[in-house]
Image (cartoon, rainbow, N blue to C red):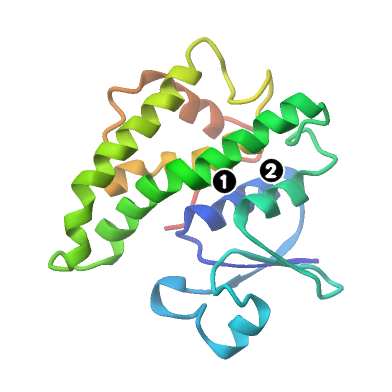
Amino acid sequence: MLTIYGMRASGNCYKLQLLLDQLGREYHWVDVDSAHGETRTPDYLAKNPNGKVPLLELDDGRRLAESDAILCYLAEGTSFLPSDSWLRAQTLQWLFFEQYSHEPCIAVARFIRGWLPAEHPRQAEVPALLQKGAQVLAVMEQHLAGREWFVGEHYGIADIALYAYTHCAGDGGFELADFPNIRTWLARVQAQPGHTPMQR
């Protein structure tokens, strides 16, 4: 059985929960609270020297880190990851966008507002993150004009990756009222068979 080390309230970890639930695969979840130092213990660092969640562990002891790499591994051979080389490259394009442009604004704003005290110095970062995040959301809004999914004609891991932190963007102070295409897409993702919510 697959083992996932993760924090339920983390969007990066939620991606894996959502995909596995929609695939109907059995897995064992080990809660690791990264917000309170549990990824920095000697035992966990022996598993993932980078000290982050999520982490996938196979029955044979092999381990894989980085949420989108794990998504690709789990989706291999399923409809969630296209076999066509061009569509697969587009999927990777959106996965890289999610980690390089989307997550550093939207997820970080959510972390600062949700996990750090109001007087913490990092609260000063939020206005700039909201501005940058709005630009990221605008890219997504434009791409979704006239299309249902981020890649091709089918729901896939590009949608899962971007859904994870977009659907809870309000936690970080983002207002989605000005992004009707995104709101319609979020509802479409939530209506997919096997969809399960994030456990906050």
Q: Amino acid at mark 1?
A: Thr
Please say if the residues under marks 2 and 1 sit with CB atoms less than 8 Å apart: yes
Image vertical order of residue 69 relative to residue 161, above or below? below
Where in the figure is residue 154, as x and y percent of width and height?
69, 23
- Number of callouts: 2
Q: Of the numbered discs in the image, which one, if any, rests on residue 138?
A: none
Residue in the image at 37% along x and 19% along y: 180
| Residue closest to the eye, 24 or 87 | 87
Where in the figure is residue 183, as x and y percent of width and height?
40, 26
Q: Amino acid at mark 2?
A: Gln
Asked if residue 68 lies left or right of residue 98, the reply is right
- Indicate which disc, 2 or 1, sits on the residue closer to the N terminus: 2
Residue in the image at 81% along x and 38% along y: 78
Residue in the image at 57% along x and 89% along y: 42
| Residue closest to the eye, 193 or 125 | 125
Name the element at disc 1: loop
Question: Which residue is farthest left?
Answer: 119
Residue 76: image quadrant is: top right
Q: Of the numbered discs in the image, which one, if any, rests on residue 196?
A: 1
Question: Which residue is farthest bottom?
Answer: 42
Q: Is residue 150 visible?
A: yes
Where in the figure is residue 36, as x and y percent of width and height?
40, 77
Image vertical order of residue 124 relative to residue 191, above or below? below
Residue of label 2: 22
Residue 4: image quadrant is: bottom right
Report the quarter where the N terminus lies. bottom right
CA neighbours of label 2 inside 10 A, class few (<14), some (14 to 19), many (20+):
some
Image vertical order of residue 123 relative to residue 134, above or below? below
Residue in the image at 66% along x and 46% along y: 19
